[in-house]
């Protein structure tokens, strides 16, 4: 997991060959003005999703993992809390991996919580079980899905 600001995202280009194209796209995009929806960046290699969601109590936010995609979660407005736990320490799967949606949930408790504000990012790799949308109020966010190499 990486926590940083959107302006520093290019510092992580060496982590995945698709990150440079994502950074170029995000530099030109006016994320806060985009309506909810899915936006292509590079075919199946990277795409963007914009959403506005109500936040929830920690107990109602399940840990999730992805096998095929890295999540770059960007807070556009509001503050969003996240729970996190190393996937290898998760022991209570809620079911099998949904390969079509590339998501599996766990009933484990996160080992830590943190909050991101506007312009801050969380990069979650397949080993990062993360529980998004924790807190009070609403958040507008962008999630870039980047294919794992």
Image: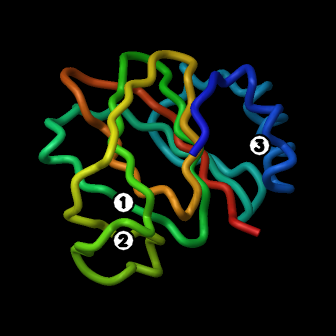
Q: Of label 2 and label 1, which has the lower sequence position?
A: 1
**What residue appears at the point 69 percent right and 66 percent down from the top-left corner?**
148
Residue tagged 2: 104
Crowdedness near tag 1: few (<14), some (14–19) or many (≥20) residues, C-alpha within 10 Å: many
Confirm or deny contact between disc 2 and disc 1 (CB under 8 A): yes
CA gap, disc 3 to disc 1?
A: 23 Å
Residue 1 image point, x, y percent: 57, 46
99 w.r.t. 121: above or below: below
Task: Name the foreground residue: 53 vs 37.
Answer: 53
Q: Quick one: quadrant of the C terminus?
A: bottom right
Q: Residues within 10 Å of mark 3 (few under 14, many from 20)?
A: many
The residue tagged 3 is 22
Identify the mark nearer the N-term, 3 or 1: 3
The relative height of residue 6 versus residue 103 in the rendered view (above or below) is above
Query: Would you name the residue on which mark 1 appears?
Result: 64
Check the image and report above or below for 70 versus 111: below
Instruction: Mark 2: give few (<14), some (14-19) or many (20+) Cα within 10 Å.
Output: some
Say which residue appears at 38% left-offset and 25% top-offset.
115
Camera-side mark, 3 or 2? 2
Q: Earlier in the sequence, mark 3 or mark 2?
A: 3
């Amino acid at each position: 997991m990486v926590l940083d600001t959107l302006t520093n995202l290019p510092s992580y280009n060496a982590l995945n060959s698709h990150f440079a194209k994502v950074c170029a796209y995000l530099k030109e995009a006016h994320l806060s003005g985009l309506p909810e929806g899915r936006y292509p960046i590079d075919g199946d290699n990277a795409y963007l999703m914009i959403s506005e969601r109500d936040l929830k109590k920690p107990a109602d936010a399940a840990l999730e993992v992805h096998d095929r995609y890295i999540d770059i979660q960007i807070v556009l407005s509001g503050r969003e809390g996240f729970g996190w736990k190393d996937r290898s320490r998760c022991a209570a799967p809620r079911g099998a991996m949904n390969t079509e949606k590339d998501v599996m949930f766990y009933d484990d408790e996160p080992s830590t919580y943190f909050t991101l504000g506007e312009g801050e990012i969380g990069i979650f790799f397949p080993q990062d079980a993360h529980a998004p949308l924790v807190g009070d109020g609403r958040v507008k966010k962008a999630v870039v899905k980047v294919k794992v190499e």
